[in-house]
Image: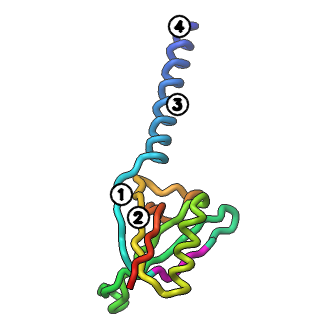
Amino acid sequence: MAETKNIFKKALWIVVGVLVAVILFLYYANFSDGYRAGVPIKVSHKGKIIKTYEGELNEGGLTSNAEGVLPAKWQFSIRSSHKEVREQLEEAIEKNKRVKVYYHEKYVRFFWLGDTKYFVYKVQILED
């Protein structure tokens, strides 16, 4: 009986360890890195209990869907700790400047981090 309890405890610790490792991997690992260019059209601080920063970039061009022809927009999230990124995007919105945004794409979306899997970490305001 005691041997069965020990085996069960070991199996439980292994399952918990694997689960923690998977969650940490999904939280810290990036699926892809890249950049996009366009005109930022929105930066907002949204949420009822957990506030996140969300943005939208007009990449130019048009897409066709059931609603008709729409401008190509890309939605992204900004970590709360990246205040400089938010300020640069807000400046670009005010001055109607094109930007190049660098981002990390995560494997999954964690609701407390943002509404998307794309996290902008650097902004470069492009010259005319």
Indicate the position of residue 54 as horizontal and vertical percent values: 54, 70
Residue type indicated by callout 3: Val
**In the figure, 16 relative to 35: above or below?**
above
Residue 113 can be seen in this image: yes
Q: Residue at x 49, y 42 (%)?
A: 23
Please identify the quadrant where the N terminus is shown. top right
Q: Earlier in the sequence, mark 3 or mark 1?
A: 3
Q: Separation of disc 4 and disc 3 at Cα? A: 20 Å
3 or 2: mark nearer the eye: 2
Q: Which mark is residue 16?
A: 3
Query: Is residue 116 covered in magenta?
Result: no
**Residue range (magenta):** 40-44
26 and 38: which is toward the camera: 38
Q: Residue at x 44, y 54 (%)?
A: 108
Q: Which mark is residue 3?
A: 4
Q: Would you name the residue on which mark 2 appears?
A: 102
Q: Earlier in the sequence, mark 4 or mark 3?
A: 4
Q: Earlier in the sequence, mark 1 or mark 4?
A: 4
Horizontally, residue 46 falls left or right of residue 102, namely: right
Query: Is residue 42 covered in magenta?
Result: yes
Q: Which mark is residue 33?
A: 1
Task: Determine whether the residue tagged by mark 1 lies in a helix, strand or loop.
Answer: strand
- Does the residue at mark 4 contact the one at mark 2 (Cβ under 8 Å)? no
Q: Residue at x 56, y 78 (%)?
A: 90
